[in-house]
Image (spheres, rainbow, N blue to C red):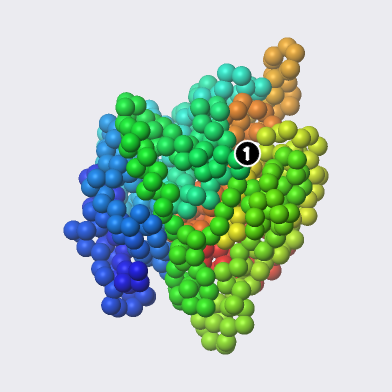
Amino acid sequence: MRSFTNKVRSKIVGKKSPVILVSVFLLGAGGLIATAENANRIVPPFQIFADPDGALATVNLNGLTDTTTNPFFQDLGSNGRRCVTCHQPSDAWSVTPQHIEERFAASNGMDPIFRPVDGATCPSAGVSTFEERRQAYSLLLSKGLIRIGIAVPPNADYQVISIYNRYGCNATDVISMYRRPLPTTNLPFLSAVMFDGRESSPATGTTKIVYNNYPTSLLSDLAHQSLDATVGHAQGDGTRPTPEEQQQIVDFETKLFTAQIHDRFAGDLRDGAKGGPAPLSAQPFFISLNSSVHFLLPAFEQPGGLVTPGDGQFTSNIFNLYNKWAQASNDDQSAARRSIARGEQLFNTLQIPISGVAGINDDVAAGGLVAGGIPTLQGTCGTCHDTPNAGNHSFPTPLNIGTGDPSPANRSVNLGGLDVSYLPEITVCRKDATTGPATNNCKTTTDLGQALVDGRFDHVGKIKGPILRGLAGRAPYFHNGSASTLMEAVNFYDIRFNLHLSDRDKNDLAAFLRTL
């Protein structure tokens, strides 16, 4: 397996795009080098790619995948798009602005990722000239955002009052959302498919993922998502992928595990530690595993537990990858390792007064089944990122922590210090339960989140938290790309929850997150 761990960075991209090879010298000599001949042909059992903070790696439990036959890499629609077009192995199976920019330059903006249907800020944008294409695809190039048009549910208990969208997509019946492509790796840890959970919802003919139906529900939801993605993003006719091709796609992507494997300061993340994708691929998981919401509301979220379902155990020590590095010796590499260990400890133990979070402080139950909530919950990072060594929520619990909220005082910076000025502003008001017209109970947001799936005003802005592994390879962060770096993400939480972190604490947390 380690024969692949040396000079490799290759990109598998969409049709008409070149293969780009860059050596990863930091890992030493003696390994196999990806070539233009094989980089477009196979996904090997183990593969490493450089990223800004070192290198990430993917374990492919399928063995050797032939990309010339697997439908994940094939044209299934009408516009040249493939699954891999927006889910690149070199970008932790998402896409990054840096590499999107490279593809734009290499193809004059004609690579399959650049299609008006969703790559442009609005489908009506002109794309005839090079400069028109650069303007039309500006959010894709700068933030890696794909436009997703979602119709307001006919049974919505809210009314869309106004939309300010500088790109021209101001329709109030089909709302344009701008979101990052989620990675197609580490998928067995998912408790909901898509940021808003729409591919795990009866509203789309899919199934909510719960303990009693996992993993069957996850696999069927992913198959449905592959079809929807082809019809929408690849502008397919609905006949492909066939059920057999859907199964091949799901079989492939659910056996991929990706994590950071080398840090440019701390070195090999497997050296006396448990970094990299191999331990992750063996990490136990079940729906509601270690969920804090289960212990707050056991009647709602069964079975809970840590070792076995329903065993009554819970721990806030979500990650245990680098605890042995806490006592590293005194040199530059060891100092970096101690910082990472401190960051992991902070992630596990830092006390966070959680307030103003829809989904926790208004109604604890994600489905809104229990009213009241908890005005202030004393939690940790693991309250919302509870899956051990993966970091997402192990139960489908979409939350609104404010990453999509514009600030009333300064429309370019929200309450957590994130610049969201490039996003539309959408104002919705709850309808009167008796008369139907909108009331004065209104919200302004840049993303309606789960409310566009189930039509519930209470769910405006609610988004699931993603799996945290492989972060260093897929910046920018949050569903809308509003944090360019992991330090910006840390600063958001510091401001949003009044944590008053020291500079060392912030640096340690960011250093730890970069190693995931």
Instruction: Write down the quadrant of residue 61 in the picture.
Output: bottom left
Tell me the residue at 69%/69% (across/down). 502
Which of 197/14 is in front? 197
Instruction: Write down the quadrant of residue 491 in the picture.
Output: bottom right
User: Taking 508 as reference, is 349 left or right?
Assistant: right
Tell me the residue at 73%/21% (across/down). 439
Instruction: Give the vertical position of 8 relative to 30 (above or below).
Output: above
Image quadrant in which the N terminus is located: bottom left
Which of 241/161 is in front? 241
Tell me the residue at 51%/28% (across/down). 204
Q: How many marks?
A: 1
Expressed as whole percent of the image width and height from the top left, the position of residue 338 reads: 59, 78
Expressed as whole percent of the image width and height from the top left, the position of residue 290 reads: 66, 54
Which of 184/224 is in front? 224
User: Taking 430 as reference, is 248 left or right?
Assistant: left
The single residue placed furthest to the top in the displayed view is 435
User: What amino acid is labelled 1 in the image?
Assistant: Lys
Q: Secondary structure at mark 1?
A: loop
Q: Which residue is mark 1?
A: 462
Instruction: Write down the quadrant of residue 6 in the picture.
Output: bottom left
User: Taking 409 as reference, is 454 left or right?
Assistant: left
Tell me the residue at 39%/33% (across/down). 227
Can residue 418 be seen here? no
Can residue 79 be seen here? yes
Expressed as whole percent of the image width and height from the top left, the position of residue 459 reads: 65, 33
Expressed as whole percent of the image width and height from the top left, the position of residue 91 reads: 39, 55
Query: Label 1 neighbourhood size at 10 Å, few (<14), some (14-19), many (20+)?
Result: many
